[in-house]
Image (tube, grey):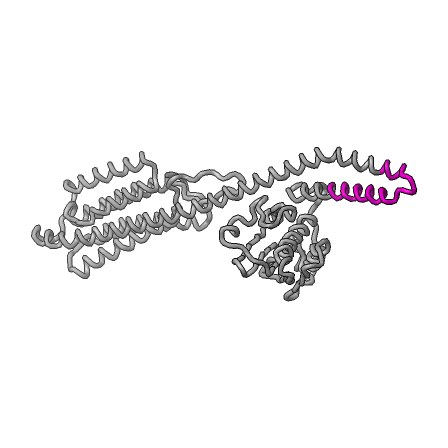
Amino acid sequence: MSADCSSLPVSLRDPEPPEPRAINCDWLLRLRLGSLLGQLATIATVQWGMGIQLPLLPLFVLISLALTTTLGALYWRRKQRAIPALLLPALMVHDVLHLTALLSLTGGPLNPFGFLYLVLIAMAAVSMTSRFTWTLATLSAVCSALLFVWNRPLPMSHAEQMQLHIPGMWVAFSVAAIFIVYFLMRVTHALREREHELQAARNLALRKEKLASLATLAAGAAHELGSPLSTINLVAKELLRNLSPHAEGLREDLELIRESVERCRLVLTQLASDAGQHPGESLSTHAVPDWVSSARHPLPSFPPVYVHLRGPIAKVLLTGPERALTHALSALIKNAQDASLDAGRSVDVYVRAVDSAIEIQVADTGTGMDPATLEHAGEPFFTTKQPGRGMGLGLFLCREVADSMGGSLHIDSAKGKGTTATLRLPISSQTEAVA
């Protein structure tokens, strides 16, 4: 793994696979800080609890040096600065030399805390490259061997040292096990979070790809059908112009043809607009009550829709593409009407300001969705409606509009209990000035 200590960002536009063993070095440094505090506690226990005289000055100098480097690296990270890639390998090498010096001053090879070399090697194995891990393992082996040559015996007999060595080995084993388990659990947690972020990025990229495909399909349909529709419209006009005054029945049919052609044109234009093509549409600011009213206007009157404005939202403003915003809310309400149609019950729309966002809840009294259906809700061209009543694009396009504005769309549903769609959109910065 790379020793880069930066956080683990995931690009939503072009996700890249993470390093296989990528971790966040902030808590790695905190783990190092904890080990230094443990060393101080051990020295205090041996010196004053067990009455064994230790060379306190050189020990405290060694710990102070390691503590200074650790706190310095943590402070650097708090300033949101990138730590050099070589810093963590250097700190790990320092830890091996630091441990060797501590062991050399406290009994050498008879000190049971030599187990801690394994902790450092395990940390390197899951956080560094294989080449560096082998290098650190070799360095640890060499330093451990040097303890047999250079060491400061404790002021006690060999028999007394061996008597303390047995329980000391158990303590050292327990400490090493705790550090290794803690470290590996943190690495596993970090990798799991990284995988979730990557999966979210993949899902977003897949949605963007589907939206681009839909835009291409809409543009192609508009191009291919535009010419035949224009021809049909032109022929209908000519027939109307040359129609006999006595053929009133045929005139009504021709008018119906012209209206149908115009409706087809509007559908193609709307489809292209919903798919992300907003020709000439710029961002504009809308009062929330007016926006809700505009979204309700083209909808059928049955089932009835009741809007509940909660709190002082009369002057709350939204900024975004007017057509896309209006159609997004219309799609939510129309879905709720379709779900409530068979029961003939009303649809309730609750609008309120929450923190710095507008929350719109659209609740129907339909049959609801089971977990399997709910999992696919919002996917393009997925619909539970009868053929001809919908294309399965309403929720998908509404979520795209919400995402593009920094908002969200959440669907809550249960079989037999209806469905509630919650749309959250950020409030315009102009709201405070108006208020």
310 to 216, vertically: above or below: below
What x and y, as percent, mark residue 249?
85, 44
| 205 relative position to 283: left or right | left
What x and y, as percent, mark residue 421?
58, 56
Classify the position of the C terminus by image quarter.
bottom right
**Residue name at image x 47 percent, y 44 percent:** 199
- Is residue 244 in the magenta section? yes
Labels in figure, total? 0
Which of the 4 image quadrants contains residue 17?
top left
Front residue (pair 386, 280): 386
Which of the 4 image quadrants contains residue 210?
top right
Residue furthest bottom in the image: 311
Please say whether residue 318 is visible from this viewpoint. Answer: yes
31 to 271, vertically: above or below: below
What x and y, as percent, mark residue 114?
20, 46
417 to 188, vertically: above or below: below
Please say whether residue 403 is visible from this viewpoint. Answer: no
Front residue (pair 67, 208): 208
Front residue (pair 167, 191): 191
Residue furthest right in the image: 245
What x and y, as percent, mark residue 274?
66, 44
Q: Main secondary structure of the magenta part?
A: helix
Front residue (pair 142, 301): 301
- Is residue 311 in the magenta section? no
Residue span colored magenta: 237-264
| 371 relative position to 264: left or right | left
**Residue name at image x 15 percent, y 60 percent:** 51
Classify the position of the N terminus by image quarter.
top left
